[in-house]
Image: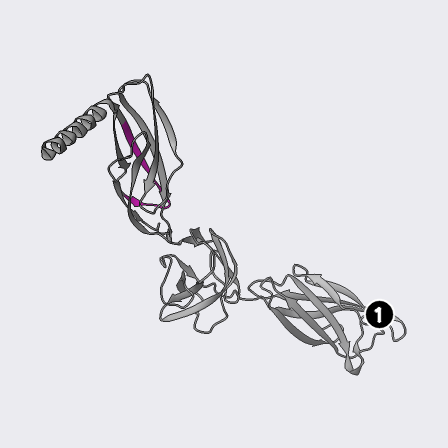
């Protein structure tokens, strides 16, 4: 008798459960990752698109509350959507991740229904791989100067030079490798000094490149050559004469000096001194020198007294290259 009563109670409980479930709405959720596999620049944003579907709604409206769960344990705030009839509604979220500290990651997100039922969607799995962009290689396209002067600066033109950190500039070819001193550095131009190194030959071509500071690797092309300038011949001062003399042994006197230039580059300016025996300079005013342009070949000077003795005429020639040369001549009036 007890067994029959127990079975009857169990039957009634199951029947009531079936009736209750038949009266409850059916809630399901699905979610997918877009893209589910990513490889590229980071940080990247993975989109998640899903649907919450409700069937068997018995009420005028049904409030459904949900949140997103992530594989790293993070939970979104609870959100609410309202259904007034059976159907599906879209939901979405995003996850931005990846970088130097997280170059790869495999994870998932899912929808968690928290009201009126406890329901979870599938796990929307995804995989992320960060690709570190390779910076463009420095490219030398040419030089500002027609030739490079030993001891002078050369301007290297190009693109993608970046910053100077960890880099250097060197000249090579014909069995030599010589570091250049960097004067200035930008992304498109580098000014460097070519050393006055005896291994670097005038009139010879060499390549210049950007390299690692430890000389272990060329970072740029080394296909652009530069020829080392030949030192131009400097025009010397010749044919010096004192063509006129006037004055006496008392008071100022006058000398007219002429000269000419040899072949080559003339000086930019010439500084002249006139000395006499042990007196030293006799130019007036005392302690001054005479300066003329490199185009001049005649100069009238004033001296202290006139004697029939040899005069030492000293020319200091200053050339456009910065070179200086001293020329000395001993002449009498009329010579």
Residue 85 percent coordinates (x, y):
29, 18
Q: Which is nearer the eye, 76 or 215?
A: 76
Most extreme residue toward the top is: 60
* Count of number-bearing discs: 1
Q: Which residue in the structure is indicated by mark 1?
A: 253
Q: Which is nearer the eye, 84 or 279?
A: 84
Q: Which quarter of the rendering shows the N terminus?
A: top left
Residue 310 percent coordinates (x, y):
75, 79
Q: Going by the image, does 328 lie left or right of 244?
A: left
The magenta region covers 38-52
Q: Helix, strand or loop at disc 1?
A: strand
46 in the magenta segment? yes
211 in the magenta segment? no
Q: Which quarter of the rendering shows the C terminus?
A: bottom right
Depicted 8 relative to depicted 241: above or below:
above
Depicted 15 relative to depicted 224: above or below:
above
Depicted 158 relative to depicted 233: above or below:
above
The residue sitting at 37% across, 44% down in the picture is 74
Residue 262 percent coordinates (x, y):
58, 66
Q: Main secondary structure of the magenta part?
A: strand
The picture quadrant where one finds residue 6 is top left
Q: Going by the image, does 69 lie left or right of 152?
A: left
Most extreme residue toward the right is: 250
Q: Which is nearer the eye, 270 or 49?
A: 49
């Amino acid at each position: 008798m007890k067994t029959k009563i127990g079975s009857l109670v169990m039957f009634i409980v199951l029947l009531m459960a079936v009736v209750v479930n038949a009266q409850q709405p059916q809630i399901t959720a699905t979610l997918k990752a877009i893209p589910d596999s990513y490889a590229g620049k980071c940080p990247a944003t993975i989109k998640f698109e899903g649907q919450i579907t409700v069937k068997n709604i018995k009420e005028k409206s049904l409030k459904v509350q949900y949140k997103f769960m992530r594989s790293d344990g993070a939970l979104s705030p609870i959100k609410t959507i309202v259904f007034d009839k059976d159907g599906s509604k879209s939901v979405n979220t995003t996850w931005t991740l990846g970088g130097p500290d997280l170059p790869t990651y495999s994870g998932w997100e899912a929808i968690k229904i928290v009201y009126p039922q406890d329901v979870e969607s599938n796990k929307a799995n995804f995989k992320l791989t960060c690709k570190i962009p390779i910076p463009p290689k420095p490219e030398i396209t040419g030089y500002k100067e027609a030739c490079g002067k030993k001891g002078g600066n050369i301007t290297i033109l190009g693109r993608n030079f970046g910053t100077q950190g960890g880099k250097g500039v060197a000249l090579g070819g014909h069995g030599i490798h010589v570091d250049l001193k960097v004067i200035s550095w930008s992304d498109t131009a580098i000014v460097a000094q070519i050393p006055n190194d005896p291994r670097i030959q005038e009139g010879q071509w060499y390549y210049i490149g950007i390299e690692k500071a430890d000389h272990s690797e060329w970072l740029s092309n080394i296909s652009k050559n530069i020829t080392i300038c030949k030192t131009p011949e400097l025009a010397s001062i010749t044919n010096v004469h004192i063509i006129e003399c006037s004055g006496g042994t008392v008071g100022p006197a006058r000398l007219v000096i002429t000269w000419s230039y040899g072949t080559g580059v003339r000086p930019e300016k010439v500084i002249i001194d006139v000395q006499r025996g042990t007196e030293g300079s006799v130019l007036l005013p005392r302690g001054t020198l005479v300066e003329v342009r490199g185009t001049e070949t005649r100069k009238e000077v004033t001296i202290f007294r006139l004697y029939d003795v040899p005069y030492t005429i000293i020319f200091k020639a200053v050339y456009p290259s910065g070179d200086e040369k001293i020329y000395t001549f001993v002449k009498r009036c009329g010579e």
